[in-house]
Amino acid sequence: MSELRDLYQEVILDHNKHPRNFHGVDPHSHEADGYNPLCGDRVRVELRVNDDGLIEDIGFQGDGCAISTASASIMTEVLKGKNLDEAREVFDHFHALVTEDDVEPDPMKGKVAVLAGVREFPMRVKCATLAWHTFHAALEEQGEFTAE
Ligand code: ZN
C-alpha cells in the first residue's frame, strides 16, 4: 500500500493546488450545499444533466481543507460526461472504498482509486466524502448535506 500512499499524497497536493472544475455551472439542473462541521469544510456542487441523462457539466465552489478540495476536484473530473447510472455506480464504489477495509480499488474508475489512501487517515474520511455526499444530495434534490 505504500505506493498507493505516495500516489495519494501526490494527487491530493496537486488537486488542492490546482482544483479542477472550481466554478459554478450556469444554467444548472441540480445543486446542493454541503457542510462538514468536524473540519469546517464547505462545498457547493452544481451540475447540468442534459436530455440524454448525461452530466454535461459539473463544478464545485467553497472553502475546505486540502482533502475535501482535492476529493471534490477529482469527483468533478471523474463524473463529467458520465450518465447518471454510471455516476451512481462511481459514487457507490468510492463510498465503499473509503469506508470498508476489504474493498479493492477498481482501476476502471480512474483517480477514484487514489482516494482509497484516505482510509489510513480515518479522521479525514468525512472530508473526503463531503463533496460526494453533496453531489448525491443534489441528485436526490435534497438541497443540502451535513456530515454527522
Ligand atoms: Zn476537512
Image: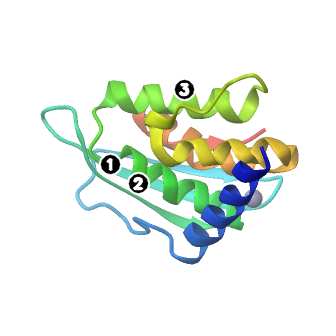
The correct choice, above or below, for 107 with respect to 93 in the image is below
Q: Marks 1 and 3, Cα distance to the nearest angstrom? A: 16 Å
Element at label 2: helix
- Badges 2 and 1: C-beta atoms under 8 Å apart? yes
The N terminus: image quadrant: top right
* Residue at screen point 73% across, 59% down: 6
The residue nearer to you, when weighing 4 against 49, is 4
Q: Which residue is mark 2?
A: 77
The residue nearer to you, when weighing 20 against 36, is 20
Q: Earlier in the sequence, mark 1 or mark 3?
A: 1
**Residue 89 placement (x, y as % from top left):** 45, 25
Q: Earlier in the sequence, mark 3 or mark 2?
A: 2
**Residue 92 placement (x, y as % from top left):** 54, 26
Describe residue 39's horizontal placement relative to residue 132 as left or right.
Answer: right
* Residue at screen point 70% across, 49% down: 4
Look at the image and tell me whether residue 131 can be seen: yes
Label 2: how many Cα within 10 Å (few below 14, some 14–19, many 20+): some
Q: Which residue is mark 3?
A: 92
Q: Amino acid at mark 2?
A: Glu
Q: Amino acid at mark 1?
A: Lys
**Residue 59 placement (x, y as % from top left):** 39, 59
The C terminus: image quadrant: top right
- Determine which of the numbered discs, if any, sits on residue 104 in the image: none
Total count of labels: 3
**Residue 20 placement (x, y as % from top left):** 44, 66
For ligand 1, tell me if the residue under mark 1 lies within 8 Å: no
Q: Which residue is mark 1?
A: 80
The residue nearer to you, when weighing 127 against 32, is 127
Label 3: how many Cα within 10 Å (few below 14, some 14–19, many 20+): few
